[in-house]
Image (cartoon, rainbow, N blue to C red):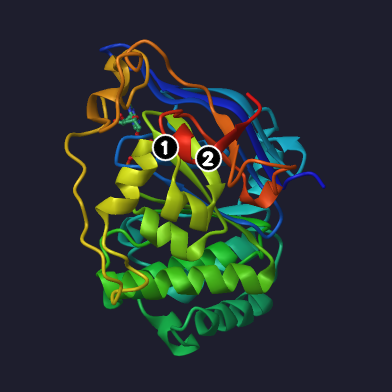
Amino acid sequence: MNPLLEVRGLTVTYGSSHGDIPAVRGVDLSVAGGEKVGIAGESGCGKSSLALALLRLLPRTATVDGEILFDGEDVLTMSFGRLRAVRWAGASVVFQGAMHALNPVRRVEEQIAEPILVHGGDRRSARIRAAELLDDVGLGAARGRAYPHELSGGQRQRVMIAMALACTPKLIVADEPTTALDVMIQAQILRLVGGLVADRGISLVMISHDLSVLAGTCDRLAVMYAGRVVEQGPAARVFADGRHPYSRALAAAFPRVGDPSARHNPQGLPGDPPDPSDLPPGCAFHPRCPVALPICPTVDPPLRRWHPAPGPAPAEAGAIDAACVHVRESHAAVGP
Ligand SMILES: Nc1ncnc2c1ncn2[C@@H]1O[C@H](COP(=O)(O)OP(=O)(O)OP(=O)(O)O)[C@@H](O)[C@H]1O
């Protein structure tokens, strides 16, 4: 079966007066129908640029290369008319910072109804659907009369989720949907998004700097560093037993949001991701890597496929693609 979303060799480069900024560097990613895929990485690793590229929402200063096949059609080359039809109805985005994404002078029920009207729904059915969606996201239809400033941050984010669901798309892209919310509300909102998409068979691409948050919501995880995916595989494995030292460091860096009772002392990751316009040579992570070897400044390792144990054919669901070979000892590598 073809994946719903297939990203091949995606690059995003911003032009600036100081030169080019390569924010995304050759990313491959696929999302099956109904699958929930998390994209993790620290600030500046290129997650938002990737998310915005998926629906051609990048600013004009960005140059995009590669292929983004959504339901078999290339988003990067489709006409604007077709793109308008795909946005909301085919795929929708929940942005970070709901206060800025909502119109401050319109009631939230009108804003939820808007995509339905734009995609040919009549006023009456759009109003009824908006009320249903407000119930579905746990706000209650009566709150639809409110203006955004009358709602809390978590409630506004629920409105954004209702908008994203309004046309029952095949894919929702949620970019840091819980940034700026407190930890308990974050967990509630993430559970809500995970449950709503699962009930409807909608695929999800969820972006966060927090691997633990993603591991609790997603089926598969892709870890980004300096514009590249350095590891991807089943969520539980990448989180608990990542192959790449960066995945391990990220997994260790955060408290477990979904499970506050878990015994876990977060271990900070020293330093910052590199400036994309001035990347270290070789593996971009090597200056911060606790297991770096002398070869690391000279080789940017390609993704390799790993499986849990040596022996006969690997179970595909358990396979991991990772770019670092330093943890080779504990797992067998399969193929290039
Ligand atoms: N409009 C832009 N013009 C120039 N550079 C940009 C632009 N947007 C992002 N960048 C740069 O591209 C790189 C990747 O940024 P991006 O926002 O995609 O990363 P991110 O992982 O999503 O980080 P965050 O979580 O902070 O949004 C960063 O170095 C950022 O400064």
1 and 2 marks in contact (CB < 8 Å): no
For the image, the number of numbered tags is 2
Instruction: Find the distance from the CA under tag 1 to the CA under tag 2.
Output: 12 Å
At horizontal 46% and vertical 83% (from top left) the residue drawn is: 138
| Residue where numbered disc 2 is placed | 331
Nearer the observer, 206 or 286: 286
- The answer to which image quadrant residue 279 occupies is top left
Residue type at mark 1 is His
Residue type at mark 2 is His
Assign ligand 1 to one image quadrant.
top left
The answer, for residue 152, to whether it is visible in the render is: no
Q: Image height check: is 319 above or below 278?
A: below
| Residue where numbered disc 1 is placed | 244
Nearer the observer, 194 or 181: 194
Picture coordinates of residue 3 (x, y %)?
73, 45
Mark in front: 1 vs 2: 2
Nearer the observer, 239 or 326: 326
Q: Earlier in the sequence, mark 1 or mark 2?
A: 1
Badge 1 element = loop
Picture coordinates of residue 132 (x, y %)?
59, 83
Q: Image height check: is 334 above or below 220?
A: above
Badge 2 element = loop
Q: Is mark 1 within 8 Å of ligand 1?
A: no
Quadrant containing the C terminus in the rendered view: top right
Picture coordinates of residue 1 (x, y %)?
82, 47
At horizontal 39% and vertical 76% (from top left) the residue drawn is: 188
Q: Image height check: is 150 above or below 279?
A: below
